[in-house]
Amino acid sequence: MTVSMPSSVDETLRLLSDDPAATILAGGTDAMVEINYEHRRPASVVSLRRVNELATWSIDGGTVRLGATVPYVEIMNSELAAASPGLAQASRTVGSSQIRNTGTVGGNLATGSPAGDTIPVLAALDAIVEIASVRGIREVAVVDLIVGVKRTVLEPDELIVAIRFPVASGPQEFLKIGPRNAMVISVASCALVINQAERSVACALGSVSPAPLRCGDAEEFAAANIDWTSDGIRITDPRTLETFGSMVADAASPIDDHRSTAAYRKHGIAVMARRALTRATTS
Amino acid sequence: MTSTDTGHTYRLNVNGSDRVVDGSWLGESLLYVLRERLGLPGTKNACEQGECGACSVLIDGVLVCSCLELAAAAVGTDIVTVEGIGNAGPTDGNGLTDVQRAFVTEGAVQCGFCTPGLIVAVHDLLDDNPEPSRSETHEALAGHLCRCTGYGRIEAAVEHVIEIRRD
């Protein structure tokens, strides 16, 4: 077994080109569990610890560019929290302090679990993933990156280098159901992103479908029933909130598994979607 | 990997000392290397999946689960375990830090298995935020499982340290 510690993206891409079977190690919060439990016995590991350029972020004009290995704690405790409050909320629900100190959004996407906490927010933000290899850079929408349970369109020699999404222009909410307030793999989650400039609503769900799920009908319904004013947004008819919750739940396709039942997940999604829209329109 | 893929040698900086890791398989976690190769059993092994916090250490000053760190990829970092947590600050006649002493006096140690991870985490919390609210303490320590105390005595120990450091 070999462990490589490149110090630049270019060096990393060359290593992956020479050895596409290598396991890429970012925060390690997923990969190391698989190695510890002998579910994965890599012949080679490429650690991203020293690739400092992947751990940086910037806000340029209206766009956030988040390096793939920026840890969750940085998203919660920097200017990123104001630029992307939904992502900051989701980051705060990840694992524990220890996990948030090391876990990364790039890793969350590359693992591609239906329960990945940042994925619904990024799907609602129409986030774009920058994917690099020695062949160049390509860009893929988050909703197209993950195509099934822990299945992505990433080629073995490709590396997620950054995620881009717009700076918040309106309220954002992230809600998640689990057995306790920490260390939870979500039973169901819901992200709501309201864009006041464009008068649009985006809603995406986690843990209720194999791949990221947007709720187009419910989004259009909410946008049509919000009272868009210059000093904030309101819902004048309270029935709108209930209807929105039901429509979002209709979009979900949950299953029964060891964490919950499909029926409970659908119910939970309706409650969370209603609550998210309530919070977003009364704050 | 094959079962004979061992014998690798590399160096780690642990508690301020340059340590040689010998005869290792490169897939070993930092937790395993600390306990089994470097003779530092203070860091405890329970879940090996980041759920329990018993293996918490500091890497470059950041609180992490050592079970989720590939030891061979921690080359070049500064690692602090519970054995070295008192190196940077004052200790009493028994070599205990204020946090360790507070755990003793407040009865926050019962079976003791979660204690080393919590000691490291409480130092990390209070060094960063000397006056955490109860909620902040709960959130900071939510990654630690203790099956004995019910957490009340641990919380009391944290409050005790906050008071001591305030004076």
Image (spheres, coloured by chain):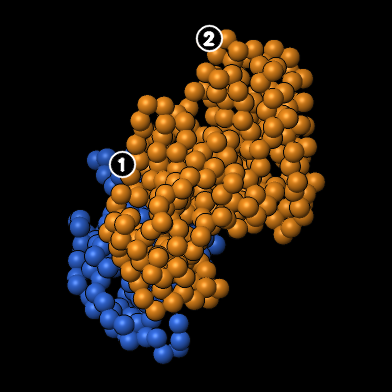
Q: Residue at x 42, y 62 (%)?
A: A25
**Nearest the eye: B53 or A259:** A259
Q: Residue at x 49, y 76 (%)?
A: A41
Hey, which residue is sitting farthest bottom in the picture?
B4
Quarter of the picture containing the C terminus of chain B is top left
Pinpoint residue B22: horizontal percent, then vertical percent.
29, 83
Say left or right for A136 vs A33: left
Name the amino acid, label 2: Ser
Hey, which residue is sitting farthest front in the picture?
A135
Say left or right for B100 vs A146: left
Which residue corresponds to mark 2? A230
Say left or right for A245 vs B84: right
Using the image, determine if residue A237 lies above or below residue B155. above
- Read off the chain for label 2: A
Which residue corresponds to mark 1? B130
Q: Is residue B139 visible?
A: no
Using the image, determine if residue A51 lies above or below residue A75. below
Q: Which chain is blue?
A: B
Q: Which chain is orange?
A: A
Crowd around label 2: few <14 · some 14–19 · many ≥20 (10 Å): few
Quarter of the picture containing the N terminus of chain B is bottom left
Pinpoint residue A143: horizontal percent, then vertical percent.
59, 44
**Nearest the eye: B141 or B30:** B30
Pinpoint residue A71: horizontal percent, then vertical percent.
40, 48
Label annotation for residue A183: none
**Nearest the eye: B87 or A90:** A90
